Image: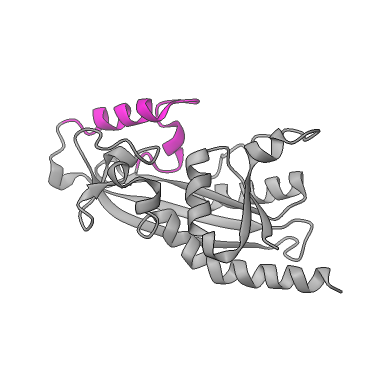
Amino acid sequence: MPHRLVFATRNEGKVAELRELLADLAIDVTSLAELEARAGAQRVPEVDEDGETFADNAVKKARQVSRATGLPALADDSGLEVDALGGAPGVISARYAGAGATDEENNEKLLAALAGVPPGDRRARFRSVVALADETGPLAGDVITASGTCEGQITGSPQGEGGFGYDPLFFVPELGATFGELGVGSKKERSHRARAIRALAPELIAYFQLANAGSSK
């Protein structure tokens, strides 16, 4: 029987990517949107991502969603760091163009900020931190975290229609394509989130083994 895990996001692109990454681990990934769509389910309160780092936000989301749902929760906080912009947009990547900004609006602001910056100076990386919390289970107050990065550079215009967020602008030289051209399935071995999940996988397996041992007593 698959282990059940709620992914603390309503971003369906992230959910699809996580399911790909955990396909071999027999884990039933449920998104917040799917959880809330069930009869009688209450909406999980939004988490104020006010941390100074990706780790701060990932841990906060995992804890609050686990507490609200009574389930083990996996949270991710990730974003784009552009060297020429001093690491911006960083932790505000999802709201770079303002609260509620669309991917297109964020991408347009990024391109405007880099106007006149030559290709060789457009170095950037995607960074991801993932956190696993189970506030009412074996982990109690502990949170397991892992991180991953992917190096690349920002293109002069969007390329490709796959993926989400800044994917159409993020070119990976070793792959010869943007994440937007690769799409979710093809980028799963190289993305920042893939690397973070791979780093977390042994801890995730150990956690479920511990949880199963506790439930069988």
Foreground pick, 90 / 94: 94
Q: What residue span does the magenta drawing correspond to?
A: 88-115
Q: Residue sitting at 19 percent across and 52 percent down?
A: 176
Measuring from the top left, give residue 156's x and y in whole percent. Answer: 19, 35
Magenta span has 95?
A: yes
Foreground pick, 24 / 88: 24
Q: Quadrant of the C terminus?
A: bottom right
Q: Is residue 52 visible?
A: no
Measuring from the top left, give residue 106's x and y in whole percent. Answer: 37, 30
Q: Is residue 179 visible?
A: yes
Foreground pick, 185 / 59: 185
Q: Residue sitting at 25 percent across and 31 percent down?
A: 111
Q: How many callouts does the rendering have?
A: 0
- Asked whether, in this view, residue 167 is left or right of residue 53, the answer is left
Measuring from the top left, give residue 74's x and y in whole percent. Answer: 61, 53
Q: Quadrant of residue 194?
A: bottom left
Residue occupying the far front of the picture: 1
Chosen colour scheme: one colour
Q: Main secondary structure of the magenta part?
A: helix
Q: Quadrant of the N terminus?
A: bottom right
Q: Residue sitting at 69 percent across and 72 percent down?
A: 209
Does residue 106 lie above or below 74 as drawn? above
Magenta span has 163?
A: no
- Asked whether, in this view, residue 173 is left or right of residue 212, the answer is left
Q: Quadrant of residue 43?
A: top right
- Asked whether, in this view, residue 8 is left or right of residue 88, the answer is right
Measuring from the top left, give residue 91's x and y in whole percent. Answer: 45, 42
